[in-house]
Image (cartoon, grey):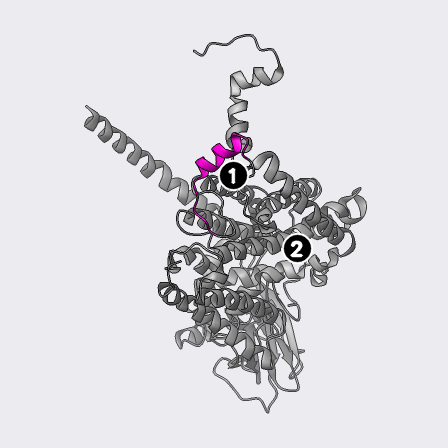
C-alpha cells in the first residue's frame, strides 16, 4: 500500500490520491503544440466547445420532449417553444449548433486535407476523425426525426428505404429498422434512444480516441515540418521560448484558441438570436402526415453533397455511388501515395486536386438543394462523375508527385 | 501449465460467447422486430361503388397510402387492373418505387408524378420516366361485391402474383 503523509492543501491531498499534478502536466502544461500554425488549428477546440453546447442545450430539451407520435410535435413546437421559460433558447442553440457543427467539421476536414495531416503516423487521427463525422451524421439524422414534422417523417422514410438495397428488395430489413411498415411509434422511440444515449456515448468515446491518436504523431504544422518535439520542449522549458518551435497547450495554445472561439461564438450567437430560421425548415412545422409527401424532400445542407451523388443515377447505381461517397474519405491516407507532408500549394498536381475536390463538393451541395429538373440534373450528374474521377485520379497523381 | 490455462480460458470464453452472446444478439434482433399489434392491424375495406372516373382516391392501409383510380374508357386496360363489375380500377401502394415518396396524380395527363426525384408513372402504375426501377406495387386485395378488401389475398391477386406482375 502507498504511503500517505498529511497533506497541506486540497491540491496536495488530491495529488496524493489522483496524481493530479502529473495529469495536469501530461495533458495540458507540457502537452506541446507547434508554434507554426494558424487560426485553422483552433477548429478542433471550437468543435469540442460546440459539442458541449449541444450537450447542455440537449439536456434541457430532454426534460420536456415527449417521444410519442401523438405528442412529440406539440411537445417541441408548443410546450418547449411557448411554455417553457427560455425553451426557445435551448431549441435554437441545439438547432443552430447541429448545423454549424458540420460547417466547422468540413473546415476541419479540408484543413487536414490541405496540410497533409493524415499521413506519416497521423492515419489514425484521420480515421477516428472520419468516425466522428459518421457518428455526428447519424446523430444529426436521428435528432431530425424527433420533432416528428413532415420533413422528419419523410426524411425517415427515404433514408430507411435506402437500406432496401435497390434491386435486392430487402424490405424485411427496412421494416426491421423501422419496427413498422412505415415510420411510426417504434421508429420514433428507437431513434430517440439512439439520439440521446447510444450515439452520444459513441461520440464521446471517439473524441477521446481522436485526442489520443494526436499524442504520438503530434499536431501537424503549416509546413508539414518534421522536427524533434522533445528537443523543442526542452528549449521551451529552459526558457528559450523564442528559439523553441513549440508552445504548451495550456495556457499558451488555449489562450489563442479561446480568442478564435470568442470570434466564433459571436457569429454563433448572432445566428441563434437573429437568424435561427436557417436551421429550422418551414416544412418541418407541419406535423408528420404519412399520406402527404412534401413537394420537395431534401436533407439539411450538410448532407446535400452526398444526396446529390445519389440523385442523378438509376436506383441501383445511385445507391452504390452513394455508399462509396459515404466511406471514400476514410481511404484518403491510403489513396494518397505521396510521402510529402506539406501544404497542397507546394505539392504540384495535388494542389489542383484539392481545389477541384473542394469546388466539386460545393457544386454538389448547391445542386442538391435545387429541384431535380433540366440543366440542374446535367450539372449534378457531371459533378457526381467528377467526384469519382477525382478519387480515381488521386493515387495516380500522388504517385507521380516529386519528393520534397 | 500456461497452455492448459490458455485452453481453459479459450474454452470457457468461447462457450460463454456461444451460449450467451449469440442468444443475446438474437434477443436484440427480435426486440427491433415489428410488434404483433403492428402486424395485426392490417385490413382496410374500400367501397368503390361511388368512385368517379379519373379521380384519384387515396386510402390508408398499414400506414401506407393506397391509390384507387377508376379508369376512364380512354385509358388503356392493363393486366394489373382490378375489375369490379364492369369497371376497371388501378389499385396500388402509393409510394414511389424509387425511394418511397408519394407521387401526385395529374389528372389532365393521366400520370403519377413524383416530386422527390422526378419519377413518373402512367395511369396503370407503370414507370415511364426517371429513376423508378419498377411499377407501383399492387397491395394484397380481394374483391367482395363493390368493396375492395386490402390485406387479404384474393384469387385475382394470387393470379397477378403468380404472373409476376407484383411482389
Reply yes or no: does residue A231 show up in magenta: yes
Residue B19, percent across and down?
33, 37
Q: In which quarter of the image is the C terminus of chain B?
A: bottom left
Residue at the spot of label 2: A148
Q: Which quadrant, please, contains the N terminus of chain B?
A: top left
> Residue visible at 62% across and 67% down?
A297
Report the front residue among A394 and A367.
A394
For the magenta stretch, what is the residue range? Answer: A224-240
Residue beneath label 1, please?
Answer: A244
Residue B2, disc: none
* Camera-nearest residue between B148 and B139: B139
Q: Distance between the residues labelled 1 and 2?
A: 55 Å
Q: Position of residue A246 (x, y in %)?
A: 52, 40
Q: Check whether the beta carbons of the residues at disc 1 and disc 2 lie within 8 A of each other.
A: no
- Does the image show residue A231? yes
**Nearer the viewer's eye, disc 1 or disc 2?**
1
Amino acid at each position: 500500500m502507498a504511503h500517505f503523509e498529511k497533506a497541506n492543501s486540497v491540491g496536495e491531498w488530491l495529488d496524493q490520491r489522483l496524481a493530479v499534478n502529473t495529469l495536469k502536466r501530461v495533458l495540458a502544461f507540457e502537452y506541446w503544440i507547434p508554434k507554426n500554425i494558424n487560426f485553422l488549428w483552433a477548429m478542433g477546440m471550437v468543435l469540442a466547445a460546440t459539442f458541449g453546447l449541444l450537450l447542455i442545450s440537449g439536456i434541457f430539451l430532454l426534460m420536456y420532449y415527449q417521444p410519442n407520435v401523438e405528442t412529440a410535435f406539440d411537445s417541441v413546437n408548443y410546450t418547449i417553444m411557448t411554455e417553457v421559460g427560455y425553451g426557445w433558447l435551448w431549441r435554437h442553440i441545439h438547432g443552430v449548433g447541429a448545423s454549424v457543427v458540420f460547417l466547422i467539421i468540413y473546415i476541419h476536414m479540408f484543413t487536414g486535407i490541405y496540410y497533409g495531416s493524415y499521413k506519416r503516423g497521423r492515419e489514425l487521427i484521420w480515421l477516428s476523425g472520419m468516425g466522428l463525422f459518421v457518428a455526428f451524421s447519424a446523430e444529426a439524422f436521428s435528432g431530425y426525426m424527433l420533432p416528428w414534422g413532415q420533413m422528419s417523417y419523410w426524411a425517415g422514410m427515404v433514408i430507411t428505404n435506402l437500406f432496401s438495397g435497390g434491386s435486392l428488395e430487402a424490405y424485411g430489413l427496412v421494416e426491421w429498422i423501422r419496427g413498422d411498415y412505415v415510420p411510426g411509434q417504434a421508429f420514433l422511440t428507437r431513434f430517440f434512444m439512439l439520439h440521446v444515449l447510444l450515439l452520444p456515448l459513441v461520440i464521446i468515446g471517439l473524441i477521446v480516441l481522436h485526442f489520443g491518436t494526436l499524442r504520438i504523431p503530434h499536431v501537424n504544422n503549416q509546413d508539414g515540418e518534421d522536427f524533434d518535439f522533445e528537443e523543442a520542449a526542452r528549449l521551451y522549458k529552459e526558457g528559450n521560448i523564442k528559439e523553441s518551435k513549440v508552445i504548451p497547450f495550456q495556457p499558451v495554445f488555449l489562450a489563442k484558441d479561446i480568442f478564435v472561439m470568442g470570434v466564433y461564438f459571436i457569429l454563433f450567437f448572432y445566428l441563434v438570436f437573429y437568424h435561427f430560421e436557417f436551421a429550422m425548415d418551414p416544412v418541418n412545422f407541419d406535423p408528420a402526415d404519412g399520406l402527404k409527401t412534401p413537394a420537395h424532400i431534401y436533407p439539411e445542407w450538410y448532407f446535400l453533397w452526398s444526396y446529390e451523388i445519389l440523385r442523378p443515377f438509376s436506383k441501383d447505381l445511385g445507391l452504390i455511388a452513394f455508399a462509396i461517397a459515404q466511406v471514400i474519405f476514410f481511404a484518403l491516407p491510403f489513396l494518397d501515395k505521396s510521402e510529402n507532408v506539406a501544404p497542397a500549394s507546394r505539392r504540384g498536381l495535388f494542389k489542383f486536386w484539392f481545389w477541384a475536390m473542394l469546388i466539386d463538393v460545393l457544386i454538389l451541395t448547391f445542386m442538391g438543394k435545387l429541384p431535380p429538373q433540366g440543366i440542374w440534373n446535367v450539372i449534378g450528374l457531371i459533378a457526381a462523375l467528377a467526384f469519382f474521377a477525382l478519387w480515381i485520379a488521386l493515387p495516380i497523381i500522388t504517385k507521380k508527385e516529386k519528393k520534397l | 501449465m500456461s497452455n492448459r490455462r490458455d485452453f481453459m480460458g479459450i474454452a470457457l470464453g468461447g462457450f460463454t460467447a456461444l451460449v450467451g452472446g449469440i442468444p443475446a444478439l438474437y434477443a436484440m434482433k427480435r426486440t427491433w422486430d415489428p410488434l404483433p399489434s403492428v402486424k395485426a392491424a392490417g385490413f382496410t375495406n374500400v367501397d368503390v361503388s361511388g368512385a368517379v372516373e379519373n379521380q384519384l382516391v387515396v386510402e390508408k392501409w398499414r400506414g401506407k397510402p393506397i391509390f384507387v383510380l377508376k379508369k376512364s374508357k380512354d385509358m388503356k386496360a392493363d393486366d394489373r387492373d382490378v375489375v369490379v363489375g364492369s369497371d376497371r380500377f388501378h389499385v396500388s401502394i402509393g409510394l414511389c418505387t424509387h425511394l418511397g415518396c408519394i407521387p401526385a396524380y395529374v389528372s389532365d395527363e393521366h400520370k403519377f408524378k413524383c416530386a422527390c426525384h422526378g419519377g413518373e408513372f402512367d395511369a396503370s402504375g407503370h414507370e415511364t420516366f426517371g429513376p423508378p426501377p419498377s411499377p407501383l406495387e399492387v397491395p394484397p386485395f380481394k374483391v367482395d361485391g363493390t368493396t375492395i378488401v386490402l390485406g387479404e389475398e384474393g384469387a385475382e391477386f394470387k393470379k397477378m402474383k403468380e404472373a409476376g406482375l407484383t411482389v
